[in-house]
Amino acid sequence: MTRNPDYDALVVDARPELTGGRRVGVLLSHGFTGSPVSMRPWGRYLADQGYGVRVPLLPGHATTWQDLNTKTWTDWYGALSAELDTMLAEHDAVVVGGLSMGGALVLRLAADHPDDIAGVMLVNPAVATKRLDVKLLPVLKHLVGSFPGIANDIKLPGAEEHGYTRTPLKAIHSLIASWKPLVADLPAVKAPLIYFRSTVDHVVDEASQPLILDGISSTDVEVVPLPESFHVATLDNDAPTIFERSAEFVARVTA
C-alpha cells in the first residue's frame, strides 16, 4: 500500500520578505494517535503568510497503534523539543501551537523555555480529564493493549483525520502521567496565549481549560470559541477562524 504523504512532517522555510524582514517561525504539534494530517492545512495557511513552519511527525504515530504503545511522553516531548531548538537557531522569533496532546506538549515547551517562545496557540488542549476510568490505567495497560480509538471527532461531513482506530493504553497512561507535573509548572508560562475551544468536544472535556487559564502567568490571553466544530477543529467547520486568528496573533506577538 502506498503511504499517504500527508502523514509526513511538514517543513516550509520562512520568507522574511513577507514578514517585515524578520524570520518568524511557527512550530505546530499534532495530537495523540493523530499525525501531521490534522495540522497540515493550518501549517500551510501560516506558511502562505511568510512564516517558517514545521509540523513534525511524533514518534509512534502514522505507523501502528502497537508501535505507539512502545513510546512515551519523553519520546514525543524530546522530538518536539529538538524541533524547537532547530527553529530557534533559524528564526528571529518562534511561536508554538498544538492540538489536544500537542497543546500539552507546547505548554511544556513554553514552561521550559519562557524566554525563547514569543507566543502559544492552543486548540482543545488536554492536561486533565474528569473520566474516572483513567485511574484504572496502571493496571489495565498490563491486561489490555488498547481501547476503541478517539480519532476523527469532526463535525464537518467528509473530513477525515486518518488517526488510529485504537487507543494504546500504555502510551496514553504515559501521557496522562505527564499532566500533573505540567500543571504544576504552568506558572512558568508567560508568553502571550490564544486558546481555541470547541463548544462540543467528545474527546477533551471541560477539566483542562480552567487549569490552564488559571495556572499560566501570561497576561496577554485570548479565548476564541469554536461553535461549529468538534475536537479536531483544525479540520472542522471553524478551521478558517483558527487559521485567520492565529495568523493575526503570530503577526502581533512577533512584531
Image: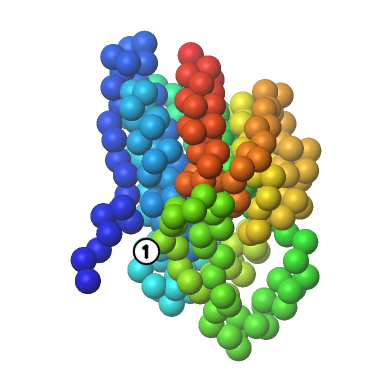
Considering every residue shown, the one lying at the far front of the view is: 157
Q: Is residue 119 left or right of residue 76?
A: right
Q: Is residue 39 left or right of residue 223?
A: left
Kindly indicate the quadrant of the structure image that contains residue 195. top right
| Residue at screen point 55% across, 38% down | 238
Q: How many marks?
A: 1
Q: Position of residue 237 (x, y in %)?
A: 53, 42
Mark 1, other Cα within 10 Å: few <14 / some 14–19 / many ≥20: many
Q: Secondary structure at mark 1?
A: loop
Look at the image and tell me whether residue 185 can be seen: no
Kindly indicate the quadrant of the structure image that contains residue 205. bottom right
Q: Position of residue 188 (x, y in %)?
A: 67, 36
Q: Position of residue 7 (x, y in %)?
A: 33, 56
| Residue at screen point 61% across, 43% down | 228
**217, 38: nearer the viewer:** 38
Considering every residue shown, the one lying at the far left of the view is: 2
At label 1, the amino acid type is Ala
| Residue at screen point 56% across, 52% down | 155
Q: Position of residue 181 (x, y in %)?
A: 68, 54
- Considering only vertical position in the picture, is 60 above or below 204? below
Q: Quadrant of the N terminus?
A: bottom left
**224, 91: nearer the viewer:** 224
Look at the image and tell me whether residue 59 can be seen: yes
According to the picture, the residue beneath numbered tag 1 turns out to be 62
- Considering only vertical position in the picture, is 181 above or below 213? below
